[in-house]
Image (tube, grey):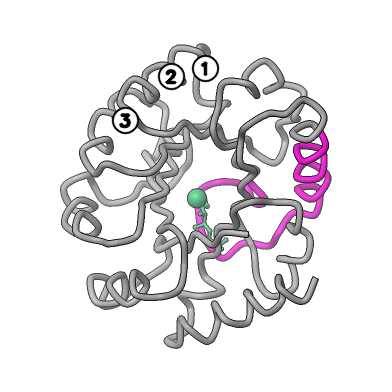
Amino acid sequence: MKISPSILSIKEDRKLRIALMDKQDIDYIHLDIMDGKFVMNKTQGFKEDYEEVSDLKKPLDIHIMVEDIKKYVDNYALLKPRNITFHYEATKDPDSIIEYIRNKGIKVGMAINPNTSIDSIGPYLNDIDIVLVMSVEPGKGGQKFIDSAQEKIDELRLLKNAYKYNYEIEVDGGINDQTVLKCLNADIIVVGSYITNTHDYKHQIDIIKEKIDSY
Ligand code: DX5
Ligand code: ZN
């Protein structure tokens, strides 16, 4: 299982702390982008994000919680991320967004809110690289894991095996050393405040890894 730490909840010494995260034994860096419309909160602008993450070594896993998806894709594509993940709920035309991201040579992720079923994204499962299961309401870090995410992860695993889909299953929100056990069928976990609310990133990451490895 791959680990993609979210840097959203890092408050002090961001540049330094993000550089420290980049040095850890992790797979990706998860960058959360909020527009104050699709979700209530708004993150700093593209220029500020660019300054913080453009010279990182780890591939970027970008999660856009925005309404004007194509505008953000145009900007954030400049960071040459591994993937850009948009919200199914934020567009009337997911097919055109999938094509838009794919045409930039970037992997396509589709995120679903806790109240969105796997059935509703059925038509897209063959065309996307990642399904991001939100295990909290999008909008802020530090929330409690919503248990029903586990059923979705397990269902996505069954569908993937049965129909030979290529997507990776990613889970985002409220993951810690306990709730990670509900995500064992995922391919990628996003872990935010469990790591970044402490100063010893390595220690927290090691605990999560040990937990995963013991199952
Ligand atoms: C929530 C974000 C998450 C969040 C994860 O809207 O998409 O990536 O930062 O943080 P924790 O692990 O604190 O829930
Ligand atoms: Zn996220």
Residue 205 in the image: above or below residue 142 = below
Where residue 11 sits: x, y (%)?
A: 34, 72
| Image position of 133 (left or right of 41) | right
Where residue 213 sits: x, y (%)?
A: 71, 73
Residue 21 in the image: above or below residue 173 = below
Q: CA distance from mark 1 to mark 2?
A: 5 Å
- Nearest to the observer: residue 18 or residue 26: 26
Q: Which residues are magenta?
A: 134-158
Q: Element at badge 3?
A: helix
Q: Residue at position x 19%, y 59% from top? A: 55
Residue 182 in the image: above or below residue 130 = below
Kind of residue indicated by mark 3: Val
Q: Residue 118's image quarter?
A: top right
Dots 1, 2 in contact, CB < 8 A: yes
- Is residue 149 on the magenta stretch? yes
- Is residue 108 on the magenta stretch? no
Q: Quadrant of the C terminus?
A: bottom right
Where residue 166 sits: x, y (%)?
A: 62, 32
Query: How busy is the neighbourhood of tag 3: few (under 14 within 10 Å), some, or many (20 plus)?
Result: many
Q: CA distance from mark 1 to mark 3?
A: 14 Å
Q: Residue at position x 65%, y 71% from top? A: 176
Tag 2 residue? 97
Dots 3, 2 in contact, CB < 8 A: yes
Query: How busy is the neighbourhood of tag 2: few (under 14 within 10 Å), some, or many (20 plus)?
Result: some
Per the rendering, the mark at residue 73 is 3
Q: CA distance from mark 3 to mark 2?
A: 9 Å
Q: Element at badge 2?
A: helix
Query: How busy is the neighbourhood of tag 1: few (under 14 within 10 Å), some, or many (20 plus)?
Result: some
Kind of residue indicated by mark 2: Ile
Kind of residue indicated by mark 1: Pro
Tag 1 residue? 94
**Nearest to N terminus: mark 3 or mark 2:** 3
